[in-house]
Image (spheres, rainbow, N blue to C red):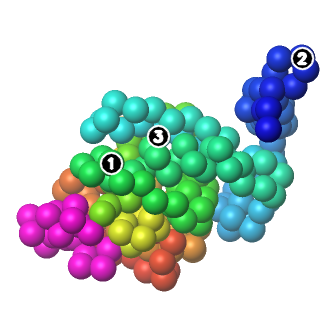
Amino acid sequence: MNDTSSSGLSRRALLGAFASVALVSAPTYSNAAGFLRGAGDIRRISMYSGRTGERLDTIYWIEGDYIGEAMREINVFMRDWRTGTAVEMDSRTIDIMAASHRMMDVSEPYMLLSGYRSPQTNAMLRSQSLGVARNSLHMRGQAADLRLDGRSVSQMARAAAACRAGGVGRYSGSNFVHMDCGPIRTWGA
């Protein structure tokens, strides 16, 4: 199947043009609960990786539908950089990340410290730190460790906790926040 129309525009270019218009006209929401229930026309995620030097800025959801190509890009971006292994990331975690980012009203992208972790990587990290769970949700593609230079760990954690959609860990000493789509809980200082 050809993804290019007779005018020479690709499906991705058309989606991008539509999303640009939708982004300008999209309303602002005061909390993530409405956002996660499907309010709004678009969802966007913007990240970079200090480990790989890669950047990602993509609209991954438009008017109730996840965009497959964008989700695949997110999966690759959030791979275990040590092994190169990628899995399908849980869209609920991506939604929590996007909603938190939107609530903080920042334009700077997240720095992704850890997305998916292979069992081997998780075991290695666990042997080096008491803060790594044996059955980490990172190994299921359901968690991310994130940093923002323009927001404190406390601000990031409050925004993520306001989503009331998963776990939020504060790691102030290491300057990052863990967000996941598991049971609602908080930890750390």
Question: Does residue 42 show up?
Answer: yes
Determine the secondary structure under disc 2: loop
Residue at the farthest left position: 128
For mark 1, does the 10 Å Cα neighbourhood hold few (<14), some (14 to 19), or many (20 or more) residues? few
Comes first in the chain, label 3 or label 2: 2
Q: Residue at x 45, y 44 (%)?
A: 77
Q: Is residue 109 visible?
A: no
Q: Whole-percent x and y of residue 88?
A: 52, 60
Residue 86 drawn above or below residue 46: below
x, y (%) of residue 169?
35, 68
Label at residue 47: 3
Q: Earlier in the sequence, mark 3 or mark 1?
A: 3
Closer to us: 37 or 16: 16
Magenta region includes residue 33: no
Q: Residue at x 36, y 54 (%)?
A: 85
Q: Position of residue 73 (x, y in %)?
A: 55, 43
Which residue occupies the extreme front position in the image? 1
Disc 3 marks a residue whose amino acid type is Met
- The reply to whether discs 3 and 1 touch (Cβ–Cβ < 8 Å) is no
Figure disc tally = 3
The front one of 167 and 92 is: 92
Indicate left or right for 20 with 118 as reference: right
Label 1 amino acid? Gly
Which mark is on residue 7?
Answer: 2
Q: Which is nearer the eye, 121 or 18?
A: 121
